[in-house]
Image: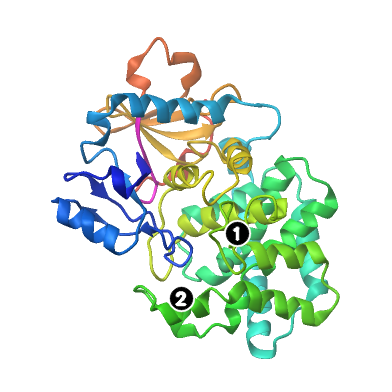
Amino acid sequence: MIIKISVAGLQPGMCLVNPGLQQQDHPEICLRDLQVEDAAQIQELRDRHFTDVFIDTDKGPYFRERPEEKVRMERMFSQVSQENPTAVASAPPFDAVAAVLPRADAQYTQLVQYCRTFLEQIKLAGAIDLESSESFVQDVIAREGPSGHAMYLLSKLRSYDEYTYTHTLNVSLLATLFGKALGLSQDNLMVLGLGGLFHDIGKMLVPEKILKKPGSLTAKEMEEMRRHPEYGARLLRERGDVAAPVLRVVLEHHERHDGKGYPRGVGNGQLAHASQLMAIVDCFDALTSDRFYARAVHQHKAVCIIYNLRGSSFSPPMVDRFIRFVGIYPVGSIVVFRNGMKAIVIEQNERSLLHPKVRVILDNRNRYCPPRDVDLAEVRHTDPNFAITECLSSRDCRIHIDAYMKAPG
Ligand SMILES: [Fe+2]
C-alpha cells in the first residue's frame, strides 16, 4: 500500500515512492523514489521545504511498527466503501463491457482522431470549434449502456503513444460517465464533457520543449506550465459564446481543496463542484496513462493516491463518490490472493468495495486454470485464501484479459 505521511513521521528504513504526480501540482510533496538511510537525508528533505512524502508500506517498517495504523487505514477505506451505497452507480460489470469492446475499439480510435484535429486547430490557428465540440459531447452523453466504459477500459489496456489527445478524450469521457453515475442533469453533463475536452487547451500555448520535458522543470518552466489554465480560459473567453460554468472548470481544474493550487490559490467553498470533480478525474487519468515524464500506474494504485490526497488536494465527499464509482479495485484490475492465485476483477460489490466479484485465472503456482467466478463478499469469512494481498496491472503481469471476457460456462 502506498500512503502519504508527513516528513516529520519519516524514519530510516522507510521507502519513498514517486507516485507519478506532477511537481508543479504538489510542490510540498517530495516526489522521488528513495530508500531513507539516515537522519541526514530526512533533514535534507526538510531543508528543501518538503512537508509530505509518499511511502511504500510493504517495503519499510511503517506498518510493522504501527499495526494499529494499518487497521485504521483499512477501516477508512471500508467506510468509503460502505457509505451511501445507492448515491453513486458503480461502473458496469466486465462481461457487459466486454460484449461491446470490439465496437468500442474503432469508436475510440475515431474519437482520438477528433481530439487530435480539435487540438491541432487551436495550436495552428487559435480556433476552437465549439459547435462540433458540443455535438461530440452530446454523442458521449447519449451513449447508453457500457460503451463509454468500454472505451475507457480499452484506453487503459492498449498502449497509445499520443498522450495529449488520449488524455483530453479520456478526461471528457470519464467526467461525463462519472457525472451520469451521480445522476446529474443534461446541462451539467454538457459542462463536464466540454470542461474535460477544453481543460488543457491552454497547453497548446505552452512551448513544446516544456510540455514534453522528461526531467523536472526549472522554476521558470514550472511558472509557465502553471499558466495553462489561464491561457485556456482566455482562449475561451475571447470566443465570447462559451458558457461561464465551462470556462470556470478550465480555469479551476488545478485549484485545490486546501487552497494550495493554481492559478488563484482559492480553496474549498470557492470552487465549483464541476471543478472539484474535474481535478480528480484529470489526476486519475494522468496517473493511469504513460506520459512523457512518468509511466502509468495501475488503477488501484491511482485510487490509493487520490484517497491519500483526500482533504488536502481533493474534496473529501467528491473523492468518496469517485471511489464508489470506479471501485477500490477497479473492473479489469488483476488481484493477487494470499495463496498466490490471480484473478480479474469483474464487478464491484454494492455492499463492500473491498470485496469485488472476481474471475480466477491463475492457480497458486501461477499456472493458467479453468476460469471460475467468485464473489469475495461471500467467501470472505469462510476462505482466508481469498484475502487480496496485491493488485497488478494486466500489462505488468502480461495477462491478456481480453481472452477472459466471456463468463465461464
Ligand atoms: Fe491541466
Mark identifier at residue 294: none
- According to the picture, the residue beneath numbered tag 1 turns out to be 170
Badge count: 2
**Quadrant where ligand 1 appears:** bottom right
Residue at figure coordinates x 78%, y 82% from the top left: 238
- Which residue is label 2 attached to? 222
Can residue 357 be seen here? The reply is no
Residue sitting farthest toward the left: 38
The image quarter in which residue 384 lies: top left
Residue 147, position in %: x, y?
67, 48
Q: Are marks 2 and 1 in contact (CB under 8 Å)?
A: no
Mark 1: few, some, or many residues within 10 Å (few <14, many ≥20)? many
Compared to 284, does 136 lie above or below?
below
Tell me the distance, in whole angstroms, between the alpha carbons under discs 2 and 1: 24 Å
Front-most of 280 and 290?
A: 280
**Can you give x and y, in whole percent of width and height, for residue 73 in the image?**
41, 31
- Secondary structure beneath disc 1? helix
Q: Is 343 included in the stretch rendered in magenta?
A: no
Task: Work out whether 370 lies above or below 239.
Answer: above
Q: Quadrant of residue 221?
A: bottom left
User: At which x and y percent is residue 215?
Assistant: 34, 74
Left or right of 324? Residue 377 is left
Q: Secondary structure at mark 2?
A: helix
* Vertical comparison of 180 with 251: above or below: above
Residue closest to the far bottom: 125
Magenta region, residue range = 389-397
